[in-house]
Amino acid sequence: MQNFKTTESTKQLVGKLKEGLKIAFIGEVNTGKSSTINAITGEEIAIVSIVTGSTVTNDEYEAPTLSKAIRLIDTPGLRAPGVDAALYRGADFIIYFVNASAGWTASAKTDFFLLKEIYGSHIAIAISKVDTVVPADDWLKIRDQIKRDLGSLSPNIIGICSLPGKEIGIEELKEEISKGLEDSQKAFLFNLILRSKSKDCDSIIRETMFKVASLAASGIPIHEIPKFDEEIIQMIQKIILACQAITNLSQDDLEDSELRAKNFYSEFHQELGWKFDFVKWGSGVLKAAGGLAGTVIVPGFGTATGYGVGISMQVVCYLACAYMIGLRAKKLYSDNSRVPLNELESLAKKMVKGLISEKNVENFIRRFTTEL
Ligand SMILES: Nc1nc2c(ncn2[C@@H]2O[C@H](COP(=O)(O)OP(=O)(O)OP(=O)(O)O)[C@@H](O)[C@H]2O)c(=O)[nH]1
Ligand SMILES: [Mg+2]
């Protein structure tokens, strides 16, 4: 689903895989959500009542008839009187209930779109109480109406009756849930892999940006930078490989990474030449990067680059920003008499040559930034 990709931590994801995925039953009041949980589990566990608003809290049930890895969440009917039934947001997959006797109403549609924003494609629609429409297959008209109305956004739609002994479509619904579960699990695993790879990618990018920033701060004139060509190219190469590792590109899609690194590097050079006039603009970037601390704690962007789009320009741009941050830092130091510029320069030089660790420089910078 859309939102967990960016908001859930790895720990939460692993926890989810262990505790099971949540399938929530959501829809207007009295649409048969609780009855359907009973029909699926084969037990009278959820409270069913003719009185509207019988479910008042989000109740969680095991579903051994489906899988040990599933929890069914019964939610209060939307707009139930006296119940503050906000749209339930904690599920991995939802079954959205539309009452066959009410049809595809404007409010059902509004709720669907709100849910769609939260759950993306992790939704199936159950047209419930199909036994109440006459003739019996008239519920198909509702299904077709929804399909027409939603077009390509339409999820799978299943007609069901959940009355004990008169069940219709419950097996089909179970299959839909299992499929949803499978997809969600795949999405979780993909996320886990992506996240750990992004972490590696982040650290490589961070290291490179750090070195580039150090290069700028070291006071080495731009025309002497080619001295470090090889090193920079290697670092860029690492970035490319890291980016490729998280984009799942096939071997055919990969260009020779060294060639690409060289291209990046020359683009980087051009970018720098052009950006030199924009050092003032760079101070805006500095702010975004966390001020002076940006010299060393350059924000990683692994996840952002993880999708393979426009990596080249992003890398160039970030390296150029890192460079400007370095220049800016140097200027700040030189403007402040209490800070020994030569110390910073030699430190930065050592950093570029890989003689000292990032941590040491970080400490050094921190010492002076607190003084500044
Ligand atoms: N005819 C028919 N009645 C049903 C069906 N499913 C549930 N009902 C009846 O509809 C009423 C409401 O069912 P519930 O399962 O409590 O509905 P709910 O969506 O959980 O309701 P709230 O918790 O109040 O939002 C009960 O009287 C059920 O017996 C069905 O498939 N067909
Ligand atoms: Mg209920």
Image (tube, helix red, strand yellow):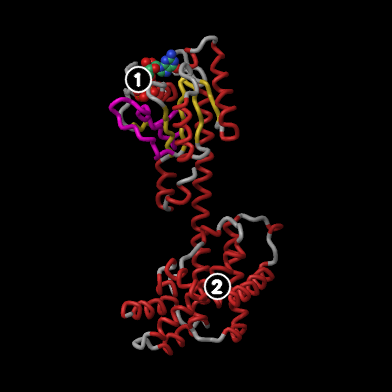
First in sequence, mark 1 or 2: give its number: 1
Q: Viewed as shown, does residue 149 lie left or right of 98? A: right
**Along the viewing direction, whichever of 182 and 137 lies nearer the viewer:** 137
- Mark 2: secondary structure: helix
Q: Please give the name of the residue rendered at 54% of the width and 17% of the height, measured from the top-left corner.
A: 139
Task: Please provide the residue range marked out in magenta.
Answer: 62-91
- Examine the rendered structure and indicate whether residue 355 appears above or below residue 195: below
| Residue 72: in magenta span | yes
Residue furthest to the top: 135
Residue furthest to the right: 252
Judge: label 1 CB < 8 Å from ligand 1.
yes
User: What distance separates the C-alpha of mark 1 from that of mark 2?
Assistant: 63 Å
**Secondary structure that dominates the magenta span:** loop
| Residue 335: in magenta span | no
- Mark 1 lies on residue: 48
Of badges 1 and 2, the one in the foreground is 2
Q: Where is residue 177 in the image (x, y as percent from the top left)?
A: 50, 31
Q: Can you say which quadrant of the picture contains the C terminus?
A: bottom left
Residue 243 appears in the picture as rendered: yes
Q: In which quarter of the image is residue 155?
A: top right
**Along the viewing direction, whichever of 300 and 337 lies nearer the viewer:** 337
Amino acid type at circle 1 is: Val
Q: Where is residue 340 in the image (x, y as percent from the top left)?
A: 38, 88
Q: Position of residue 77 (x, y in %)?
A: 37, 27
> What's the mark number on residue 320?
2
Q: Viewed as shown, does residue 42 lie left or right of 303? A: left
Q: Do the residues labelled 1 and 2 touch (CB within 8 Å)?
A: no
- Examine the rendered structure and indicate whether residue 5 appears above or below residue 111: below
- Examine the rendered structure and indicate whether residue 63 appears above or below residue 370: above
